[in-house]
């Protein structure tokens, strides 16, 4: 018997004890009344339960599948319940309460379905490379094409054709935006209205410096493949212009489209289908069955993040006529991210003790693909009080709520149990943030484990300089008196959080 099976057996025994206690509580009888009389029955029940679990490989699953995990749990537990039922019937025992027995079995089954599938999700959650752009050498950015490189001779018929085509479907504001950011009438500019990457792949090589797509990104089934195809067709420094309806624009459109009350009812079901279902592996198939991948909901952060992951740097972005237009410049080859994460649980790559990278578990508070935008947001937005980005559009509405109540950090308890973190300590940082710190503080930080509760909640620093000073003060004290320092910081931090309402936004 390997270590993992032994741990799972111990966990099952704990579940049985917890479920038994919960069942007696629901029935309204003190636990001590049942404990003595049920002790032999519980021992037999645990034996049958564990034997059934081993027989049906409930503890031996090595690859995660929601269907396989759930099937093995239900099959094993139903067999165990059948054996227990037969024992109660043939022994004609009226001593044991049917409610206690069957509610215990049901509760344990629910515990297992939740914990085992959570384990599977944790095991197969991708680590988000939030510092990817920090390792890229950037080319010189150009706001818009240099007029000197635009061809001097342009066919007047082409000018009229392009103008007519654009103005027939879009306003003059859109036309002016496209003309400002591209050599619109050049034969080096490809203007298409397509949702399939085949129409891009089929274009000749080394021909176009600019590609403009006038179909919504929302209707492209495989967005990254489309962006990767565009990246392949234009040279380094080439320009790609695309458009989309963002999540915020979609919400406004739907609420304005239908009468009051009905609009929120419609939006609620749209939210469930278009935003909740794609995030879970077991509901994603239902989402694609109903939508075929069209008219998908995409946030501004996801749109820009996908562009960055596919090798582009965002030059300009503007909302025109209820659509979002983005001008991007090719700066490198795509990352070819084959396992993007949409789920609510994520693993973040953080610097731990001795400078080793650890995987910190958190609940998602940002839109998908936001991890690719850290450098972009740092360039566009200044740091606010507390060392976080000001007006960070990557954070979702639910994410802001979870951050205020620290709900997003609850999975970090797993890192505490694994030994990656301690209760009090400096905050685990990404490579990008770590590089902003002084060399002295970087060297001092990696001597110790990061912590769940940082010195921030003791000193309440406002700027990055004050944050570094706060951490240095903590490290000085910790290296002299480790236990007493952590004990003091813990109680002061808890008091400040509860009574002074210190928050890290």
Image (cartoon, rainbow, N blue to C red):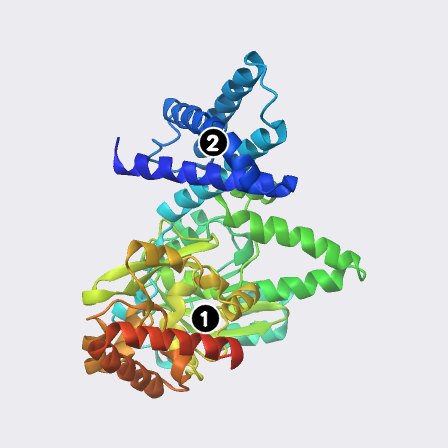
Q: What mark, if any, has residue 39 been given in the picture?
A: 2
On screen, residue 208 above or below 103: below
The residue nearer to you, when weighing 373 against 35, is 35
Q: Nearer the viewer, mark 2 or mark 1?
A: 2
x, y percent for residue 294: 57, 49
Residue drawn 47% across the image and 30% down it: 42
Crowd class of label 1 (few under 14; some 14 to 19; many from 20; radius 10 Å): many
Q: Quadrant of residue 249?
A: bottom right
Residue drawn 62% across the image and 40% down it: 29
The residue nearer to you, when weighing 82 against 101, is 101
Crowd class of label 2 (few under 14; some 14 to 19; many from 20; radius 10 Å): few
Badges 2 and 1: C-beta atoms under 8 Å apart? no
Q: Quadrant of residue 389?
A: bottom left
- C-alpha span from label 2 to label 1: 70 Å
Is 218 on the left or on the right of 146, as rendered?
right
Q: Residue at the top extreme? A: 90
Tag 1, which secondary structure? strand
Tag 2, which secondary structure? helix
Q: Quadrant of residue 98?
A: top right
**Location of mark 1 (residue):** 327
Q: Which quadrant holds the N terminus? A: top left
x, y percent for residue 65: 42, 36
The residue nearer to you, when weighing 143 against 347, is 347
């Amino acid at each position: 018997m390997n270590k993992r099976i032994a741990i799972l057996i111990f966990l099952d025994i704990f579940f049985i004890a917890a479920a038994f206690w919960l069942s007696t509580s629901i029935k309204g009888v003190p636990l001590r009344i049942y404990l003595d009389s049920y002790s032999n029955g519980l021992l037999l029940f645990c034996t049958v339960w564990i034997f059934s679990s081993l027989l049906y490989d409930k503890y031996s699953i090595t690859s995660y599948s929601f269907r396989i995990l759930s099937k093995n749990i239900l099959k094993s537990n139903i067999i165990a319940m059948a054996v227990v039922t037969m024992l109660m019937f043939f022994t004609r025992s009226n001593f044991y309460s049917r409610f206690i027995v069957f509610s215990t079995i049901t509760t344990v089954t629910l515990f297992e379905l939740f914990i085992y599938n959570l384990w599977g999700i944790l095991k197969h959650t991708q680590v988000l490379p939030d510092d990817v752009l920090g390792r890229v050498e950037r080319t010189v950015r150009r706001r818009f094409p240099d007029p000197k490189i635009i061809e001097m001779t342009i066919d007047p018929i082409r000018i009229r054709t392009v103008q007519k085509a654009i103005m027939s479907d879009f306003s003059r504001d859109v036309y002016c935006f496209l003309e400002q950011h591209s050599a619109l009438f050049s034969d080096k500019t490809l203007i298409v209205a397509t949702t399939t990457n085949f129409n891009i792949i089929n274009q000749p090589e080394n021909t176009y410096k600019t590609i403009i797509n006038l179909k919504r990104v929302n209707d492209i089934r495989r967005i990254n493949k489309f962006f990767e195809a565009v990246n392949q067709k234009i040279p380094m420094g080439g320009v790609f212009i695309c458009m989309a309806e963002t999540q915020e624009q979609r919400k406004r459109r739907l609420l304005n489209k239908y009468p009051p009350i009905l609009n929120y009812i419609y939006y609620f079901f749209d939210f469930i289908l278009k935003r909740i279902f794609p995030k879970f592996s077991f509901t994603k198939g239902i989402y694609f069955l109903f939508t075929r991948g069209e008219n998908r909901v995409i946030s501004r952060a996801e749109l820009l993040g996908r562009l960055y992951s596919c090798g582009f740097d965002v030059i300009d972005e503007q909302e025109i006529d209820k659509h979002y237009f983005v001008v991007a410049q090719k700066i490198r080859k795509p990352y070819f991210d084959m396992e993007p994460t949409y789920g609510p649980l994520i693993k973040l790559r953080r610097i731990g003790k001795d400078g080793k990278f650890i995987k910190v578990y958190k609940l998602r508070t940002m839109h998908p693909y936001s991890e690719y935008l850290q450098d972009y947001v740092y360039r566009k937005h200044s740091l606010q009080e507390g060392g976080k980005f000001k007006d960070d559009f990557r954070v979702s509405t639910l994410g802001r709520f979870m951050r205020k109540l620290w709900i997003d950090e609850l999975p970090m308890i797993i890192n505490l149990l694994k030994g990656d973190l301690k209760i009090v300590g400096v905050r685990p940082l990404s490579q990008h943030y770590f590089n902003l710190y002084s060399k002295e503080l970087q060297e001092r930080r990696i001597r110790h484990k990061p912590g769940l509760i940082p010195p921030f909640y003791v000193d309440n620093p406002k700027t990055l300089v004050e944050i570094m000073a706060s951490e240095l003060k903590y490290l000085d004290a910790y290296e002299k008196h480790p236990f007493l320092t952590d004990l003091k910081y813990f109680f002061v931090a808890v008091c400040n959080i509860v009574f002074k309402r210190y928050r890290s936004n």
